Amino acid sequence: MFIGHLVQIADTNFQVEWGYVLVSIFAFTNASSRLIGGAICDRLGYIGNMKVALMMMVAAMLLYISGLGWPALVLGTTFLGLSYGSLYTSYPNAVAELFGIENFGIAYGLIFTALGIVGSLGPMVSAFLVEVTASYNFSFLIGLTATLLCFFLVAKLKQLISQTSCPDL
């Protein structure tokens, strides 16, 4: 919802004309965090890595909503890029553990299909909300709510895994 709108977010909510720089910041932090996220995943596991990444996303949404000017915009974009890339290092481990290696191909494919659908709809919904409200703040609130929900579900995942009687887990 945010990646394709970074330039417009900078202009609409922060009155910053150099929003194109944010795209580079996001790209650099996204690529860097794939290495960092992999290291975190190796040490904390995919659940720990997801929790760290989701908390960075929460921080990003709060910075975007804060109204603290361009420093919040830059820091929020940095956190967003770091968390986005880091999450992608957790998905293969999570899918393999939760669905089994024998089901990995279909399960991973379904996850990326869902991400593609949401990745197409999110920017359109955000654009509609900006047309109606003249601000991205409602989109940030949706992002914040969704991220907190994901954090809660990931936090419960470990408990659910330990309670299952499925021998593959």
Image (spheres, grey):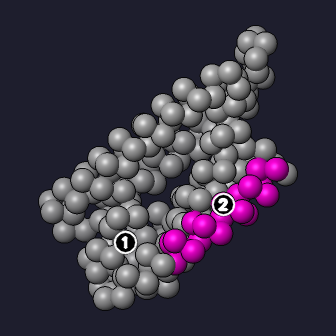
Of the residues shown, which amino acid type is indicated by label 2? Arg
Horizontal side of 78 relative to 11 (left or right) equals right
Of the residues shown, which amino acid type is indicated by label 1? Leu
Q: Is residue 83 magenta?
A: no
Q: Nearer the viewer, residue 107 or 60?
A: 107
Q: In front: mark 1 or mark 2?
A: 2
Main SS of the magenta part reads helix
Horizontal side of 109 relative to 10 (left or right) equals right
Q: Position of residue 58 (x, y in %)?
A: 54, 58
Quadrant in the picture for residue 118: top left
Magenta-drawn segment: 25-42
Quadrant in the picture for residue 128: bottom left
The quarter of the rendered structure image containing the N terminus is bottom left
Is residue 59 visible in this depiction of the protein? no
Horizontal side of 35 relative to 60 (left or right) equals right
Neighbor class of circle 2 (other Cα within 10 Å; few <14, some 14-19, many 20+) is many
The residue shown at (66%, 51%) is 89
The residue shown at (67%, 46%) is 90
Residue located beneath label 1 in the image: 6
User: Of helix, strand and loop, which one carries label 1?
Assistant: helix
